[in-house]
Image (tube, rainbow, N blue to C red):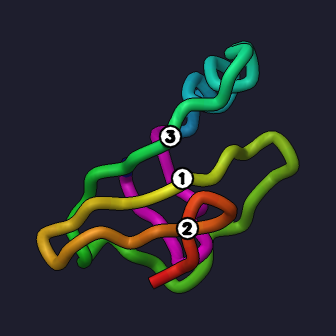
């Protein structure tokens, strides 16, 4: 996880491995990212195949996104 935004969109290393792996799973797991608050960006463009995080854990606490929890 290189960065994330307030919508749970994440910036990875550009290989697409994360999204391709998740797309093949029968059940979607809870998607958790670990980052520092300094890694939060204003906005990361999301492509149709990008799967957002459900939450991010930082040194400041837990941020929840989307259907599995309101943005905090």
Q: CA distance from mark 1 to mark 2?
A: 11 Å
Q: Is residue 27 left or right of residue 6?
A: right
Dot 2: what SS? loop
| Circle 3 or circle 1, nearest the eye | 3
Kindly give the residue lying farthest to the left in the view shown. Answer: 59
Of the numbered discs 3 and 2, the one sitting upstream in the chain is: 3
For image coordinates 55% across by 31% down, the residue present is 29
Where residue 1 appears, as percent x and y from the top left, is 38, 48
Q: Please check the rendered image and state whether residue 6 is part of the magenta-colored stretch, yes or no.
A: yes
Numbered tag placed on residue 30 in the rendering: 3
Q: Which x, y percent locates residue 39?
A: 31, 70
Instruction: Identify the residue position indicated by label 2 in the image.
Output: 69
Query: Which element type, helix, strand or loop, lies under badge 3?
Result: loop
Question: Whole-Å distance between the Cαs marked 3 and 2?
Answer: 11 Å
Which residues lie in the magenta part? 2-13
Quick check: 56 left or right of 6?
left
What residue would you read off at disc 1? Answer: 53
13 shown above or below 42: above
Q: Main secondary structure of the magenta part?
A: loop
Label 1: how many Cα within 10 Å (few below 14, some 14–19, many 20+): many
Q: Residue at x 49, y 42 (%)?
A: 31
Cα gap from disc 3 to disc 1, whole angstroms: 8 Å
- x and y, in percent, of residue 59 in the image: 12, 70
Dots 3, 2 in contact, CB < 8 A? no
Q: Locate the C terminus by quadrant.
A: bottom left
């Amino acid at each position: 996880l290189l960065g994330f935004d307030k919508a749970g969109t994440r910036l990875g290393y550009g290989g697409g491995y994360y999204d391709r792996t998740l797309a093949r799973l029968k059940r979607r797991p809870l998607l958790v990212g670990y980052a520092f608050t300094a890694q939060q960006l204003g906005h990361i463009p999301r492509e149709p195949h990008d799967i957002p995080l459900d939450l991010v854990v930082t040194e400041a606490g837990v941020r929840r996104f989307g259907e599995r929890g309101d943005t905090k």
